[in-house]
């Protein structure tokens, strides 16, 4: 998967189009990611005991990886990711500025 936890991404489609956020969690097998502040789902938690208040939690949901683009930490643009192989190591590079990201 080209994106991983901790990456900053730009959402390019759906209701959160244009938002930027950090990847909180990634599911490589399903190609889905959870992004900070994106695709928020409101979950209502019922009070467990009498007299306790119910809570409303806002949890980001998983979005398809194709709805997000990596924001390059070097040039600050939403970019396509390329790879560079040096020896037995594989680096991710920005296709705009060619820097390792
Ligand atoms: Zn760049």
Image (tube, grey):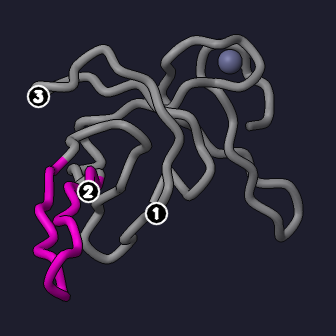
Q: Nearer the viewer, residue 66 or 92?
A: 66
Q: Residue at x 11, y 62 (%)?
A: 44
**Residue 11, located in which quarter of the rendered image?**
top left
Q: Is residue 97 left or right of residue 62?
A: right
Q: Residue furthest bottom?
A: 49
In magenta segment, residue 21? no
The spot of residue 34 in percent (x, y) is: 36, 54
Instruction: Bin the neighbour count of mark 2 within 10 Å (Cα to Cα): few under 14, some 14-19, many 20 and up.
Output: few
In which quadrant of this rendering is ligand 1 seen? top right
- Sequence-wise, the earlier of marks 2 and 1 is 1
Disc 3 vs disc 2: Cβ atoms closer than 8 Å?
no
Question: Where does the image place residue 76, in percent across and percent down from the top left?
Answer: 65, 13
Q: Is residue 29 left or right of residue 64?
A: right
- Identity of the residue drawn at 35% across and 20% down: 19
Quadrant containing the N terminus in the rendered view:
bottom left
Q: CA distance from mark 2 to mark 1?
A: 18 Å
Disc 2 vs disc 1: which is toward the camera?
2
Label 1 sits on a secondary structure element that is strand
**Boundaries of the magenta span:** 41-59
In magenta segment, residue 57: yes
Q: Secondary structure at mark 2?
A: strand
Residue 14, numbered label? 3
Camera-nearest label, 3 or 2:
2
Q: Residue at label 2?
A: 57
Spatial CA span between label 1 and label 3: 19 Å
Q: Which residue is mark 1?
A: 25
């Amino acid at each position: 998967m080209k994106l991983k936890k901790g990456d900053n991404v730009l959402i390019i489609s759906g209701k959160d189009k244009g938002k930027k956020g950090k990847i909180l969690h990634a599911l490589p097998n399903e190609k889905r990611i959870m992004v900070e502040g994106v695709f928020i789902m409101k979950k209502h938690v019922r009070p467990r005991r009498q007299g306790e208040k119910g809570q409303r939690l806002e949890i980001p949901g998983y979005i398809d990886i194709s709805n997000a683009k990596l924001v390059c930490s070097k040039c600050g643009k939403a970019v396509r990711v390329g790879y560079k192989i040096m020896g037995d190591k594989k680096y991710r590079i920005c296709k705009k500025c060619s820097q390792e990201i």
